[in-house]
């Protein structure tokens, strides 16, 4: 009987397919700890975000949400723990890791002397984005900034500054977008546009995001 099984071509070809390796996280944070002058702000925080996933960081005022996001972006130096963006370690290769990130603060402060379109041109130069104008035009249209593209940063309202920050963030197609109170100051149409870009409405999955949500 065993000889018949071994000689049967149908049985010999019935090999189980190899298991697909798990996808690499877009963002991985391990044992993040941050303190200020002996006061603990973030303690042993670990999480991971896969591509297309949205993760909310929730907590009361003073819980360390903004400190966490600023540490992940590299704005604040890491004290303890590790951050990896698309597999790139932030501490070991900071420039390469940051190329995969975008950051939208709660109150963006654009350059007073640069126009809206010049901000996008500057962002494209920083990230090495070629043929950026078509994508910039699409983003400006999405966030209703076409008529403001020659306006100076210092002339923009808070809502307009927020919209410009969204445009700059998505220009280079980052692996991860980090947002701190991203919808503050936006009008209803701007909120809808932001939700489409971040994947919270019916749209193709965007880069992974880590928005901050504050609760009391």
Image (cartoon, rainbow, N blue to C red):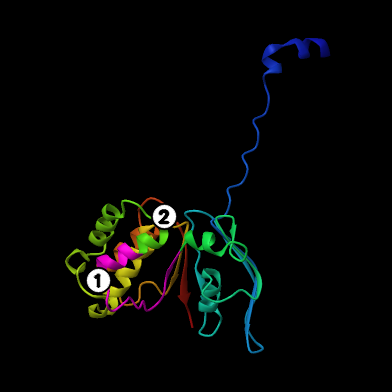
Q: Is residue 200 visible?
A: no
Work out whether 15 lies above or below 57.
above
The residues tagged by marks 2 and 1 sit, at their Cα atoms, a distance apart of 27 Å
* 119 part of magenta stretch: yes
The residue where tag 2 is placed is 206
- Rendering coords of residue 16 (x, y %): 67, 29
Q: Nearer the viewer, residue 5 or 51?
A: 51
Task: Name the side, left or right, on which 35 lies relative to 60.
Answer: right
* 53 part of magenta stretch: no
- Rendering coords of residue 78 (x, y %): 61, 73
- Rendering coords of residue 7 (x, y %): 75, 10
Work out whether 13 lies above or below 150.
above
**Residue at horizontal 52%, vertical 63%?**
95
Q: Is residue 150 visible?
A: yes
First to last magenta residue range: 102-122
Task: Find residue 115 and name its label.
Answer: 1
**Residue at horizontal 23%, vertical 75%?**
152
**Residue at horizontal 61%, vertical 39%?**
20
- Within 10 Å of the Cα at label 1, are there few (<14), some (14-19), or many (20+) other Cα atoms? many
Element under disc 2: loop
Task: Name the side, left or right, on which 141 lies relative to 183.
Answer: left
Element under disc 1: loop
Q: Nearer the viewer, mark 2 or mark 1?
A: 1
């Amino acid at each position: 009987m065993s000889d018949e099984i071994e000689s049967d071509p149908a049985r010999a070809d019935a090999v189980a397919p190899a298991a697909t390796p798990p996808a690499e996280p877009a963002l991985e944070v391990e044992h993040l700890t941050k303190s200020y002058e002996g006061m603990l702000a973030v303690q042993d925080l670990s999480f991971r975000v896969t591509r297309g996933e949205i993760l909310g960081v929730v907590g009361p005022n003073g819980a360390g949400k903004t400190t966490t996001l600023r540490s992940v972006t590299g704005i604040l130096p890491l004290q303890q723990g590790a951050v990896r963006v698309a597999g790139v370690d932030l501490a070991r290769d900071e420039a390469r890791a940051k190329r995969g990130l975008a950051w939208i603060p709660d109150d963006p402060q654009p350059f007073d002397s640069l126009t809206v379109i010049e901000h996008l041109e500057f962002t494209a130069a920083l990230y090495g984005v070629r043929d950026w104008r078509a994508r910039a035009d699409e983003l400006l249209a999405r966030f209703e900034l076409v008529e403001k593209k020659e306006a100076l940063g210092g002339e923009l309202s808070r809502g307009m500054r927020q919209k410009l920050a969204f445009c700059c963030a998505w220009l280079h197609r980052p692996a991860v977008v980090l947002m701190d109170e991203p919808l503050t100051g936006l009008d209803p149409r701007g909120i809808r546009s932001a939700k489409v870009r971040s994947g919270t409405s019916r749209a193709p999955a965007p880069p992974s995001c880590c928005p901050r949500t504050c609760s009391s």
